[in-house]
Amino acid sequence: MNVAVAYKWAADPQEAAVGENGVVDWSRATSAISEYDAVAIEVGVRFAAETGGECVGVSVGTSAAAASLAKKAAMSRGMDRGLVVADDALGGAVETEQAQVLAQLMRHAGVELLLTGDTSIDENARMMSALVAGYLHWPCLQQVQTIRRAEQGLSVTQKVVGGSHEVEVQGPLVAAIATDAASARVPGMKDILTASRKPFEQLQLATLARTPVTLAVAASSRPAGKARKNEIFRGDDAAQRLVVALRADGSL
């Protein structure tokens, strides 16, 4: 069974800087495959191998998403081919507009199972799976641990509060993969060398039907720093009083 995995060529927030006005400066942040997407890719690659299908990587972003470095980083993780929309006009596009384009990619790919990461490392919105599912008119499940081929569709194990439950799905599905669903593979030299020879198709943004979406930022500010209490506990019962204080403060 064929499966598509959405991945994002995203800037590392650990390398971003926040100005005094609260605006995030991404200019010095390097980009990579979002670490949560790498987990979804591993689940997708395994599922395709177990069912005798193909794993297709789909991505939406700026022109950097189609660069050689981004292609090798994605394809070296075991996917069979790539399908991207990479246009600088998508720089700064909000999640709703990205989801529109990603849904168009899915229709072009002709695949009825889409896996996404739990969230992206840069925006951390946890909205993409539901948004794409809405545009496709497909069901969406989040916090997915495992996906298996069932007799009449798919059997999905989903994390819920206090445990898990099994869901059987017939027809297309968007599934957001939980962060601990699999250990992401580390590509070896052979994987990296063969990645450049895998099919990698780029669709033109101008050929896709979409409605531009704008989001006006009214204001930006840095979060207020938490004041330190500077309490010092001494004596034989210092540890006990520290625990009590931490619990009262909500830290434990």
Image: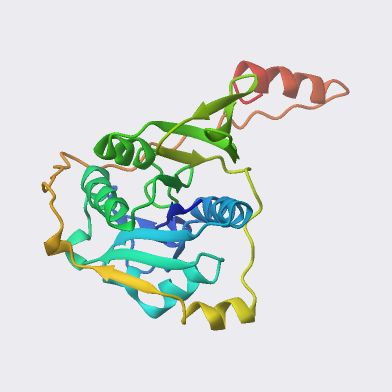
Mark count: 0
Of 121 and 189, nearer the camera is 189
Left/right placement of residue 158 relative to residue 29 reads: right
Residue, x 19% and y 40% (percent of image)?
A: 219
Left/right placement of residue 250 relative to residue 18 reads: right
Q: Which residue is most to the front?
A: 151
Above or below for 74 versus 237: below
Of 80 and 121, nearer the camera is 80
Residue, x 61% and y 57% (percent of image)?
A: 49
Above or below for 195 versus 184: below
Residue, x 54% and y 26% (percent of image)?
A: 167
Q: Where residue 139 sits: x, y (%)? A: 38, 31
Of 246 and 40, nearer the camera is 40
- The quadrant of the picture occupied by the C terminus is top right
Above or below for 36 versus 207: above
Rendered image coloring scheme: rainbow
Q: Where residue 32 sits: x, y (%)? A: 46, 65
Q: Which residue is most to the right?
A: 236
Residue, x 11% and y 46% (percent of image)?
A: 211
- Quadrant of the rendered structure where residue 155 is? top right
Q: Is residue 9 visible?
A: no
Q: Where residue 20 sits: x, y (%)? A: 30, 51
Q: Is residue 212 visible?
A: yes
- Quadrant of the rendered structure where residue 147 is? top right
